[in-house]
Every structure is written in C-alpha cells, then in structure tokens.
Amino acid sequence: MPTSLSGRDFLKLLDFTTDEIKYLLRLSKQFKALKLAGTPHRYLEGKNIVLLFQKTSTRTRCSFEVGAMDLGMGVTYLDPGSSQMGKKESIADTARVLERFYDGIEFRGFAQKDVQDLADNASVPVWNGLTTEWHPTQMLADILTMQEEFGDDLRGRKLVFMGDAKNNVARSLMVVCAKLGINFAACGPKDCMPADDVVEATAPIFAENGATCTLTSDVAEGVKDADAVYTDVWVSMGEPDEVWAPRIKELEPYRVTAEVMAQAKEGAIFLHCLPAFHDTNTTIGAQKAEQFGITEMEVTDEVFEGRQSRVFDEAENRMHTIKAVMYATLS
Ligand code: CP
Ligand code: NVA
C-alpha cells in the first residue's frame, strides 16, 4: 500500500515506522530539487497554518514560514507573549479555537504533554517544533544531510552524539538512528546520558534493524568508526542559569575538537542542529567567556568552520524537510 500520512500529527518519531520516515525523506529530496530548480510548488494553496512559539527560534520558525509560503499557504506566527494560551486559556480550548481557523498547528514549547494536549484536542495536524523531550523535525534534516554525504541507505553507518546526551536532540537522534539501522553512540558524562524511557523504547528497534546503541563516557570509544560527529548546546532552552557552571565543568572533556574529529572515520562529517557556541560573537557566548574563561563551548571554531562541517547544509535542510512534513500531513 502506498504510504500516506494524511491527517497525522507529527509529535515524535517513535510514532512513525521506518517506511514512513523514509517516505518523508524522499519527499524532502523532491521538494529540495523543486526549490533549487525554481519550480513553483504551491500544492496547498488556500490552506492556512498557525505557528505557536513559547521558546525562541530562527531555523524552525523560518522553515515553517517559508515552507508554507512556498506551498501557497497563509501563515500566522504567535510569539511567546502574544496569545492567550496557558495564561487565560487552556491548551485544550486553544486547540478547539485554532482548528476552526487553521489547517495545521505548529507548537514549540516546554512539556511534550502540551503538544500532545493540543493534538488530542485539535482535529487538524499538529507538528512538534521542539519540546523539552523531543525535536522530531530536526531529525529529518540531519538524516537528509547524512544521505547527501553517504547515500540513501545509512544502515551500518555510525553517528556519535557528544555532550549533553539526555537532551531533546540526542533523544530524538537515538530514535531516528534505531529506526534507520544507524549505529548510535551517546558520549558524555554518566548523568548526561539518555533517560531510561528512551533507552528502553529504542532497544528493540535497534535490534530489529541490526544496529547498535552504545552509551559511553569514553571519548575514544564513542568516536571510533563514527561517520557523523554530532553535538548540541550544553544548556538547552528553559534550563535554569545555575546549570551553566556544573555543565561546563563536566562537558568540557566532550567538546568536539580537531583531535576528536581525527579519531572518527576518515571522511566523517560534523553536524550540529544550531545555534552553536563556537566563538564569543553572541551575547551569551561573550558573557560565558567572561564568567568561565572559555571562548568555545560544545565545538571549537576550527571544527565548526572546517572542511568536515555540514552545519549550514543541515540548517537549509530544515526547510525542505519541514515542507515535506506539512505536505504529507495536509494533502
Ligand atoms: N535547530 C533549531 O531548531 O534551530 P532554532 O532554535 O533556530 O529553530
Ligand atoms: N537542545 C537545544 C536544541 C535547540 C535547537 C534546546 O532545546 O535548546
């Protein structure tokens, strides 16, 4: 039977089969080709979507906006302060209002429960643009970037996530690797390892797809044979300021440096969901440099700017992949 995701929510990748994920990746590739050729693809003309952001964003917001406009749709953006949701109106009531106006709802916020509540109460597709637990749209861009480097079949390849491996991005990478048969390693201190829920949920999927999952605090073991070395910020949105000091102390050994890249496979690439602290050219980067005396955090500027880095292709791929998710669920 041909794959159809019509009417589905996109809340976390555990809800999707390997074939469905591969279908979204194929669709992403087609949309990228159309965009690069300048071929119009206003397939969803007349539809409208709303973007609800309780946290800041550059890539995710712009991907939904440009993606929707390319597909011919209207877009409303509601920032953290400008809707009634949560303050004067429950998520359930908000969902029941927005479904009367819009064909799809994107949500970026804190608890996964909130995006689930929206989906449970809205009859239109709801897309998770990041929660504390998951970042599913990011994964499609990451995998598309790996496919562009290594070919469509990524089975047997290895991705290592360095640093705060308990965060939304690392958890989601673990799921997508399991689903696609990619060997996964989480490399960081013991208390930054993925939580038991995701380890338990992915174990049978890794086994079924012939891939391994390694949790290690040893950098050489984590990076050995890696085709992709991935990292993310050491402190995620919504975490309190007090975690910076201990986090920096325990994650410094897991910074992605040229020496770390040299231990990966020949031809390995560097990935990062962005934004990245690779220099002091940001307010927070400069502030942390003054406070803690470090000018680079999760990745060195040398690696970020180096020949193995694919971070800007990865960022561009957010748009093509998010467009695919909207098209697949709304058509
Ligand atoms: N990678 C990512 O989600 O970026 P934004 O926070 O800018 O959306
Ligand atoms: N882990 C990061 C990802 C940002 C795209 C955060 O949640 O802030």
Image (spheres, rainbow, N blue to C red):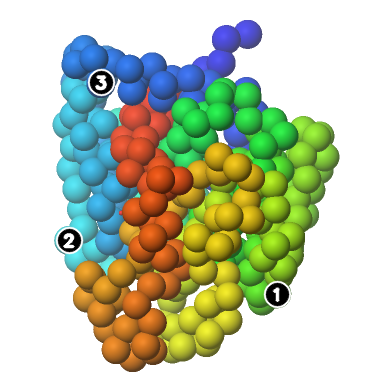
Identified at 24% across, 63% down, the residue is: 80
Q: Which residue is mark 2?
A: 82
Of the numbered discs 2 and 1, the one sitting upstream in the chain is 2
Of the numbered discs 2 and 3, the one sitting upstream in the chain is 3
Q: Which residue is mark 3?
A: 36
Q: Secondary structure beneath disc 2? A: loop
Identified at 56% across, 16% down, the residue is: 3
Q: Is 242 located above or below residue 155 in the figure?
A: below
Rendered image quadrant of residue 19: top right
* Res 71 seen here: yes
Q: Is 256 located above or below residue 248 in the figure?
A: above
User: Looking at the image, which is closer to me, 222 or 259?
Assistant: 259
- Which mark identifies residue 190? 1
Q: Position of residue 148 (x, y in %)?
A: 47, 28
Rendered image quadrant of residue 96: top left
Q: Secondary structure beneath disc 3? A: helix
User: Does the numbered disc 2 mark a residue whose Cβ is under 8 Å from ligand 1?
Assistant: no
- At label 1, counting other C-alpha atoms closer than 10 Å, the crowd grade (few under 14, some 14-19, many 20 or more) is some
